Image (cartoon, rainbow, N blue to C red):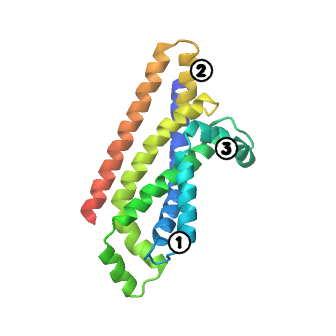
Amino acid sequence: MSPLVNATWETIYMVAISGFVAALLGGALGIILFLTAPKRALSNAAIHQSLGLIVNIARSIPYIIFMIALIPITRLIVGTSIGTLAAMVPLTLAAAPFYARIAESAFNEVSPGLIEAVTAMGAKASQLIWYVLLPEAMPSLIRGLTITLIALVGYSAMAGIVGGGGLGALAYHYGYQRFDAQIMLSTTAILVVMVQVLQWVGDYLAKKLSRRS
């Protein structure tokens, strides 16, 4: 397998796994932020404000600094700070709070009248989540996940510079340091194609779900 093909698969692997875990964590955080807001089913100012502050702090740190700061945690979790597996730790933890705010915004778009009607019928918080919030907000959640995955493609390239593997590492070590313009152009072209494919798939799924809702 050529270095370019191997690096491409490493990037796809990093983005896919990190995006999946970040969607789960960020989606859960978004639900908590939504439900604990004032006048919501589980309204709790302390939890809402504390969690919101943590999310905002995590989102405000530039990724390269965030990644370096998490090296001790990465080593604790996977046993190393170098390689594709290690890169997924900061990728996931950087994307989760980013997606949490997107998810919260998606849930805020759900009709308040529908939420009030379901709540008045005695629905529990879990029922509200599974039967109202997630189905109604799914198109927006998909669009938000698309944005998050595209951001992860860029983050993964930065992770490659500090030993994360993937196309970023290939472009830096073989393209930049060895002055190989062909490698630089090839890696850039593949990253552009990845972004375009992600955007197309995300738009398609969001439109399809919007028609069903």
Q: Secondary structure at mark 3?
A: loop
Marks 2 & 3, CB-CB < 8 Å contact: no
Q: Amino acid at mark 2?
A: His
- Location of the C terminus by quadrant is bottom left
Q: Secondary structure at mark 2?
A: helix
Q: Which residue is mark 3?
A: 70
Give the label, 2 or 3, closer to the camera.
3
Q: Earlier in the sequence, mark 1 or mark 2?
A: 1
Give me the C-alpha separation between circle 1 and circle 2: 49 Å
Work out whether 5 lies above or below 96.
above
Residue 64 location, quadrant: top right
As measured in the structure, the alpha-carbon distance from the residue carrying label 2 to the one carrying label 3 is 23 Å
The image shows residue 116, relative to residue 180, as above or below, that is below
Is residue 204 toward the left or the right of residue 83 in the image? left
Of mark 3 and mark 1, the one earlier in the sequence is: 1
Extreme residue in the top direction: 179
Q: Amino acid at mark 1?
A: Ala
